[in-house]
């Protein structure tokens, strides 16, 4: 009798030799939560624990071949999309995931640590127009949200106030942020998860929105030190928990708890930033 297989997640992302972000970080997070990751490489990164020096995008046809071959062979239950290094790759990935509208899509395409790209604006527009409307959950930092909003916001735009009644007085959920989030949701995105929202305390606030307004408003004590890969761990964990059958609000909470623990056990593997330990739970206490 065949054993029950682990949930299969198809993840699009860059190959990072440090395993701090990208495909390698996804696979570690998936495995930590009992899932099997199926990696489709969109780019190859060159760098170390200090920084990413260069990005080499994969040809769009090769991205398609990787994904379609796997999808014809295995019963994938969720998608995750991370770093994408070309407009052409955004286009083909959007076409692929559109063929599977019933599968959850966790979208986490923004990374402030990537080198400057002369096509950054075109890439941003392509993600906004082609992928965000298909996302089940979009992960985006408050800074990245503001940058993305520049692609549609007018200088004289007047935002509507939050009528959800779920605001937190210690978190800066201003009218502009809410309006920007609602613009993304109205485009088709089901949930927007804004991380790194400003607070009046030494905490990190992460806020989950849907069409009704604020769904979750979670505050976490800020962990000192320079880390890489926290965002990737968070988005991959959400994808894994959705693949395991959790509802989105519960998956977001548990993924934050896992990410916080992984950062708390981060390791200095090189001379640069710390790398989250996604297998902290498997080690015997000292």
Image (spheres, helix red, strand yellow):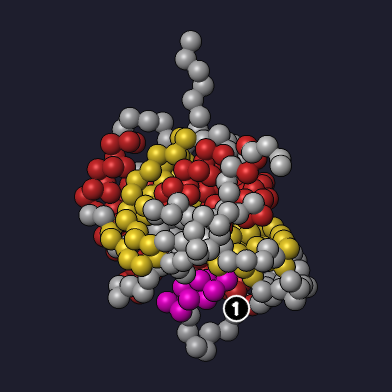
233 or 101: nearer the viewer: 233
x and y, in percent, of residue 217 in the image? 71, 61
Looking at the rendering, the stretch of residues picked out in magenta corresponds to: 142-152
Which image quarter: residue 74?
top left
The reply, left or right, for residue 15 in relation to residue 142 is left
Residue at the image point whose x is 53% and y is 84% from the top: 157
The reply, left or right, for residue 152 in relation to residue 95 is right
x and y, in percent, of residue 48 in the image? 42, 61
53 or 106: nearer the viewer: 53
| Residue under numbered circle 1 | 176
Which SS does the magenta portion mostly show?
Answer: helix
Residue at the image point whose x is 52% and y is 38% from the top: 31
* Circle 1 SS class: helix
Residue 270 vertical placement versus 144 (above, below): above
Magenta-drawn stretch contains 144: yes
The reply, left or right, for residue 46 in relation to residue 34 is left
């Amino acid at each position: 009798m065949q054993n029950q297989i682990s949930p299969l997640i198809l993840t699009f992302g860059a190959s990072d030799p440090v395993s701090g972000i990208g495909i390698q970080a996804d696979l570690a997070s998936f495995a930590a939560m009992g899932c099997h990751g199926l990696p489709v490489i969109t780019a190859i990164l060159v760098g170390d624990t200090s920084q990413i020096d260069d990005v080499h995008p994969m040809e769009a046809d090769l991205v398609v071949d990787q994904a379609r071959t796997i999808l014809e062979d295995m019963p994938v239950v969720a998608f995750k999309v991370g770093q994408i290094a070309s407009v052409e790759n955004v286009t083909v990935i959007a076409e692929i995931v559109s063929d599977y509208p019933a599968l959850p899509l966790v979208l986490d395409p923004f990374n402030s640590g990537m080198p400057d790209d002369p096509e950054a604006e075109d890439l941003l527009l392509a993600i906004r127009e082609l992928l965000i409307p298909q996302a089940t959950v979009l992960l985006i930092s408050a800074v990245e949200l503001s940058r993305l909003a520049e692609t549609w916001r007018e200088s004289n735009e007047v935002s509507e106030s939050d009528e959800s009644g779920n605001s937190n007085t210690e978190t800066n959920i201003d009218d502009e942020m809410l309006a920007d989030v609602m613009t993304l949701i109205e485009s088709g995105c089901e949930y927007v998860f804004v991380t790194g929202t400003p607070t009046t305390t030494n905490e990190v606030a992460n806020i989950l929105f849907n069409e009704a307004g604020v769904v979750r408003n979670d505050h976490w004590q800020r962990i000192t030190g320079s880390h890489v890969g926290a965002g990737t761990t968070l988005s991959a964990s959400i994808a894994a928990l959705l693949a395991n059958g959790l509802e989105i609000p519960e998956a977001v909470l548990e993924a934050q708890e896992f990410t916080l623990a992984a950062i708390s056990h981060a390791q200095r593997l090189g001379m640069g930033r710390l790398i989250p330990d996604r297998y902290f739970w498997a080690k015997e206490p000292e």
